[in-house]
Amino acid sequence: MYAIGIDVGGTNTDMGLVSEEGKIVARRRFSTSKYNNFQQYIHDMMDELKQLLATVSADFSNVEGIGIGAPNANYYTRCVENAMNLSMKGLLNFGDEIKRYVDVPVALSNDANAAAYGEYIYGGAKGMKNFIMFTLGTGVGSGIVIDGRLLLGSTGAAGELGHAILVPDGRQCSCGLRGCTEAYASSRGILQTYAELRASHDALHRDDNEPTTPGWIDHNRALTDLSCKDLGDAANAGDPLAIKAFEITAHYLGMAMANAVAFSSPSAIFLMGGPTLVGEPLLAPLRREFEKHLLYNYKGTCKVRMSELRANEVAILGAAAVIKMK
Amino acid sequence: MYAIGIDVGGTNTDMGLVSEEGKIVARRRFSTSKYNNFQQYIHDMMDELKQLLATVSADFSNVEGIGIGAPNANYYTRCVENAMNLSMKGLLNFGDEIKRYVDVPVALSNDANAAAYGEYIYGGAKGMKNFIMFTLGTGVGSGIVIDGRLLLGSTGAAGELGHAILVPDGRQCSCGLRGCTEAYASSRGILQTYAELRASHDALHRDDNEPTTPGWIDHNRALTDLSCKDLGDAANAGDPLAIKAFEITAHYLGMAMANAVAFSSPSAIFLMGGPTLVGEPLLAPLRREFEKHLLYNYKGTCKVRMSELRANEVAILGAAAVIKMK
């Protein structure tokens, strides 16, 4: 039997057929952004799915279920509710709409929860009963697994650790609150930390005629032109301000992770996403700051691990794992 | 059938016989602090239990189980590990030691977890699948119920929200970390906030000859002489600095509670303990600050409630509830 995993993104919808062994045996992609009619979108999605199955000479009788990862998805209602980055608006009832075409189990979850459960079913968290996944990117998402079950809470929307407040009355976050973890540990937050460091450095030490060290970020370069990857490359080349930006990030993210341990006492925290690819400039101080901010009885009880799923497979594997949620 | 609830405190051990309806039909107390030999302590505890049962003409055949609430208790191992405020040191194996005397189920949990589960079995959280209990006192404890089960985590020690860091590099906490919720929202933290307010007020405005307003705290009174109850009485009498101290406390505690919602999305947060008895000077700003710091999709989803268990019964009822944990 195959599990179908569908990742509904703002731009594209990625779908994959996943074998029992966790291998993606076929995949397809089609545009999400061209749809503003949800019924039409699901109609075309079902056509795409049939073509996907045909590539391995299968049909829906070979399918265990359809798992969907989507922004603002609710596992309980199988609906997407007011997702800001989708062109289709309002309440999107994936569960009911797909049932009109095919009678297989359908399950929905948000992206970060799907990523966490993907790690549990197909990745490095296999057999691990208690762990937390932090997904770092434009934002900071999280998925929490407790006793082998994804934490959903009374609303179905538990596990928004990116919006736990870390600095009272701190940086403005895109969600409207201030001082959220996301405002410090997302790629945007990291770049803001770098911008603040550069501003205070340049105010004191700026010398326009100083030769630029190869690999370091030229201070004449516009901040808007910088990506988190640029910053990571510079840190790995020894740029002191870039290194400092990741150390500050590690200070905040390490505390946020320690706070998560005070909540559910997991045996591991997994990390994935762009900023983690920077490597040691982030990870070395992160491991130190995490351990330092743990309450004494948690010290040494929780490992920091990298996701073992490939970056280009995690969305489909995570979505496929959603149908295996308990 | 009765449930036996035993609250192991540093000074006294309180035990009670709890009916199916949640009524304490008999209770006894004996000294904990006079023991440094754990075997002797359990031996005498079993004698006390027999006398307790005799008062209602019962014996252990009428007992469903023995639930114990104790500091640093581990539900998995049924041991107390290095409890700082107990005169008996080392690893105290309550489970095995009691089994030597009687063959009924024995279960252990820490005080705050027991209080949370007591609320679930006997109090205001009956039938509520997802909620969090904050216990405010000398420290800040918490117990987290998810899908009707107490959150224990990989170590058995989950749910230490008093030691989630709320202010990076903030106040020194008794646990060794800085900026913990406990350092702001415990009775000690509240008194520290008041002391800081008085120091900065007096530096600017102090007039030794100013007549003292009845009910307000006289600024000549030593800070070490003040209790959280004194501060509450003054706030209720309109003392502006005392009112301000509770508003600041509400600001921090409200954020800590909002962060807990971002974790497990409970349908209610319950509060108990001395500082909550202050009433509206704490609770009115607390409800406001809590709601204000919730992520938009949680707003209106989580109620703030007071524990419905009596202060002098919660320890025994909580301990008794531990044997009903799933």
Image (cartoon, coloured by chain):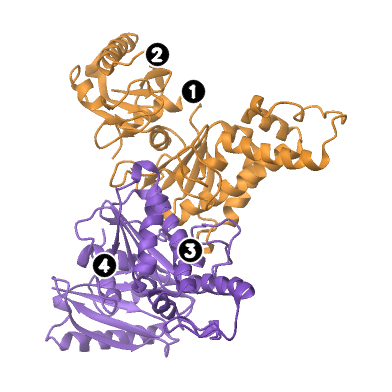
Chain colours: A purple, B orange
Q: Chain of mark 4?
A: A
Please tell me which of labels 3 and 4 falls first in the chain: 4
Task: Please identify the quarter of the rendering in which residue A320 is found.
Answer: bottom left
Tags 4 and 2 in contact by the CB under 8 Å rule? no
Which residue is under mark 3?
Answer: A248
| Distance between the alpha carbons at the discs numbered 4 and 1 | 47 Å
Which residue is under mark 2?
Answer: B31
Relative to A24, does residue B323 appear above or below in the rendering? above
Left/right placement of residue A104 relative to residue B281 reads left
Q: Nearer the viewer, mark 4 or mark 1?
A: 4
Q: Amino acid at mark 1?
A: Asn
Tags 4 and 1 in contact by the CB under 8 Å rule? no
| Distance between the alpha carbons at the discs numbered 1 and 2 | 17 Å
Please report the residue visible at 83 percent of the width from the left and 28 percent of the height from the top: B212
Q: Chain of mark 2?
A: B
Please report the residue visible at 43 percent of the width from the left and 86 percent of the height from the top: A37
Tell me if mark 4 has few (under 14), some (14-19) or many (20+) residues whose alpha carbon lies within 10 angstroms of its own: many
Q: Which residue occupies the foreground of this view, B162 or A36?
A: B162
Residue A118 numbered mark, or none? 4
Please tell me which of labels 1 and 2 falls first in the chain: 2
Tell me if mark 1 has few (under 14), some (14-19) or many (20+) residues whose alpha carbon lies within 10 angstroms of its own: few
* In the rendered image, residues at marks 3 and 4 fall on the same chain: yes
Tags 1 and 2 in contact by the CB under 8 Å rule? no
Q: Which residue occupies the foreground of this view, B199 or A198?
A: A198
Q: Amino acid at mark 4?
A: Gly
Task: Please identify the quarter of the rendering in which residue B213 is found.
Answer: top right
